[in-house]
Image (tube, grey):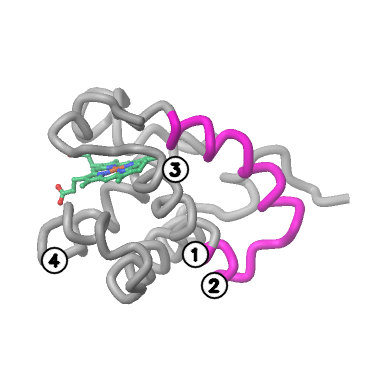
Amino acid sequence: MSGYNTPFEALGEEGIRQLTNAFYDYMDSAPEVASIRAMHGKDLTPMKERLADYLTGWMGGPQRYAEKYGSVCMTSPHKPYAIGTDERDQWLLCMDKALEQIGADDELKHMLKKPMFAIADMIRNRE
Ligand code: HEM
């Protein structure tokens, strides 16, 4: 028995913030994700916040990203970048490592597995 129905209930805003910090810190340091790191600006701090805002709503919490930016469509902000299966899998690797880093339990990891893959694959814009 977990006692939560959504990833947001499990993590809360603080947990999601820790997750996106760990996500971009991993991206910033791991050679195997260097090609997606290179797509981002030098300072990842604004991205930590934007991804946390996005995931807060996506995980079942308040719609922070929509409140600030007016949209939750993730296709257009990714259009300028060539995102294929390699880039998608690098992104998902960062997410797996971040979940590990914050001590997410197996149930939460399982709950996120398919929807995380689905959203990352939806953002993919080439083979
Ligand atoms: C599939 C692999 C992905 C790659 C390679 C990728 C890469 C990027 C890049 C390069 C940016 C722009 C960064 C900048 O402005 O410095 C960005 C923005 C963003 N990405 Fe991704 N991304 C991926 C998947 C995702 C997924 C699955 C989500 C959500 C669950 C997401 C959420 C965001 C958000 C919220 C922004 C900020 C958009 C904005 O407000 O401008 N990304 N991404």
Residue on which disc 1 sits: 98
Tell me the SS state at disc 4. loop
Q: Quadrant of ligand 1?
A: top left
Q: Position of residue 85 (x, y in %)?
A: 41, 40
- Pointers 2 and 1 in contact (C-beta within 8 Å): yes
- For marks 2 and 4, the one nearer the N-term is 4
Residue at 46% x, 32% y: name it.
119
In this view, the residue farthest toward the bottom is 29
For the residue carrying disc 4, how many other residues have a C-alpha within 10 Å: few (<14), some (14-19), or many (20+)? few
Q: CA distance from mark 2 to mark 1?
A: 5 Å
Q: Is residue 89 left or right of residue 39?
A: right
Residue on which disc 2 sits: 101
Amino acid type at circle 1 is Ala
Residue on which disc 4 sits: 43
Tell me the SS state at disc 3. helix
- For marks 4 and 3, the one nearer the N-term is 4
Depth check, mark 3 against mark 1: the one in front is 1
Up-down relation of residue 23 to residue 68 (above or below) = below
For the residue carrying disc 3, how many other residues have a C-alpha within 10 Å: few (<14), some (14-19), or many (20+)? many
- Pointers 2 and 4 in contact (C-beta within 8 Å): no
Depth check, mark 4 against mark 3: the one in front is 4
Residue on which disc 3 sits: 56
Residue at 72% x, 61% y: name it.
105
Point out the stretch of residues depicted in magenta: 97-121
For the residue carrying disc 1, how many other residues have a C-alpha within 10 Å: few (<14), some (14-19), or many (20+)? many
